[in-house]
Amino acid sequence: MAAGDPIAEVDSVRVRFLGKKGEVSRLLKQMGKLPPDERPKVGQAANTVRDAIETAVRQALDNARDEALRRELAGPPIDVTLPGRPLDVGPRHPVSRTWDEVVDVFRKMGFEAASGPEIEGDFYNFEALNIPPEHPARDMQDTFYLNSGRPAPAMTTEGGEGPDPGDVLLRTHTSPVQVRAMLRQAPPVRIICPGKVYRRDSDPTHTPMFHQIEGLWVDRNVTMADLKGTLQLFAKAFFGTKAQVRFRPSYFQFTEPSAEVDVSCSICGGSGTAAGASARSTVEPESCKTCSGTGWLEILGAGMVDPAVFEAVNYDPEIWSGFAFGMGIDRVAMLKYQIDDLRMLFENDARFLEQFP
Ligand code: PHE
């Protein structure tokens, strides 16, 4: 018997008399041995006894509970000075972590964090970036238009009237922040700008919303060598000292010359072969899935700011030069955390997210 606990004491009495192997059951089991005419009498008596015990047990239990409650209420109140038990808030999302880490690397190089609206005007998203209406370059970044024609007042530059922003749309890239930053201040400019962007795209490597990080550096005598050096430094700081970068000629309306920039594959170390494949093996080594056997992964678009962009923001292209780049944060997160399907990043499945403690 659990001494000292009245509720447990009452319960043990209940078991002793009313349990399956209790006194009352034992009595009832012996009924068969009685002469038939005595059975109803004895049965009735047994039932009466059982009912009486049940009532007594219930009463005793009620009393014991009341007594326990009375004792608790009479005791000392809750100790609010006890340390709290923290909630399990879970790990940070791999995109948020990558976002912060990338910004951090560029901050150390002297870039200042900037931001702009996700609901953007056509002027900022396209026209000032040298992409006029009806230009075919718009097709590569098909977006979601929110209305046709009327500029929203909030679309003007901070601190006064800006150019007519035109149609209102979900920005397709972070490049409009370049325009906003240059309209807001005189050169030199050195900004890094992470944010959400939107396109009409949906497949294993494209989601309608994704993240980019824009970089812009405008000053006197900024050259392509500065662009290369900056991105090389970033790759080594972010992916490790062995990381290499490669520039491939490309085309953007707002940069000239333009480049796509690849980083050596962090999974196969740039070899293009799957991890564990031996160089002496006689069988054809399996190619690395992450970089499709090329040894390189594209992470961003970049180039020297086109003079047409400087003209749109009233910077003199004879005096100022600069570079810009736009990096896919989700892509970089996939590389860093070895995630093979982009959509996993946005499904918010706790089983996936818990894998990045
Ligand atoms: N905005 C471009 C894109 O989204 C990337 C880019 C940014 C290219 C800056 C050059 C300079 O595709």
Image (cartoon, rainbow, N blue to C red):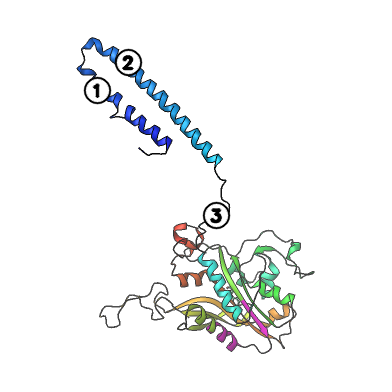
Judge depth for marks 3 and 1 and give the one in front.
3
Q: Please name whichever residue, 337 or 119, is drawn nearer the observer in this view of the structure.
A: 337
Residue interval drawn in magenta: 215-232
Q: Secondary structure at mark 1?
A: helix
Q: Which residue is mark 2?
A: 45
Q: Which residue is mark 3?
A: 82
Q: Secondary structure at mark 3?
A: loop
Of mark 3 and mark 2, the one earlier in the sequence is 2
Q: Quadrant of ligand 1?
A: bottom right
Badge 2 density bin: few <14, some 14–19, many ≥20, Cα 10 Å: few
The quarter of the displayed image where residue 23 is located:
top left
Q: Is residue 4 left or right of residue 105?
A: left
- Residue drawn at 43 percent across, 35 percent down: 6
Residue 324 drawn at (x, y percent): 62, 79
- The question of residue 188 being in magenta is answered with no
Of mark 1 and mark 2, the one earlier in the sequence is 1
The reply to whether residue 131 is visible in this rendering is no
Q: Is residue 331 above or below residue 324?
A: above
Q: What amino acid is at disc 1?
A: Lys
Q: Please name whichever residue, 207 or 9, is drawn nearer the observer in this view of the structure.
A: 9
Residue 117 drawn at (x, y percent): 67, 66
Q: What amino acid is at disc 2?
A: Ala
Q: Which residue is mark 1?
A: 29
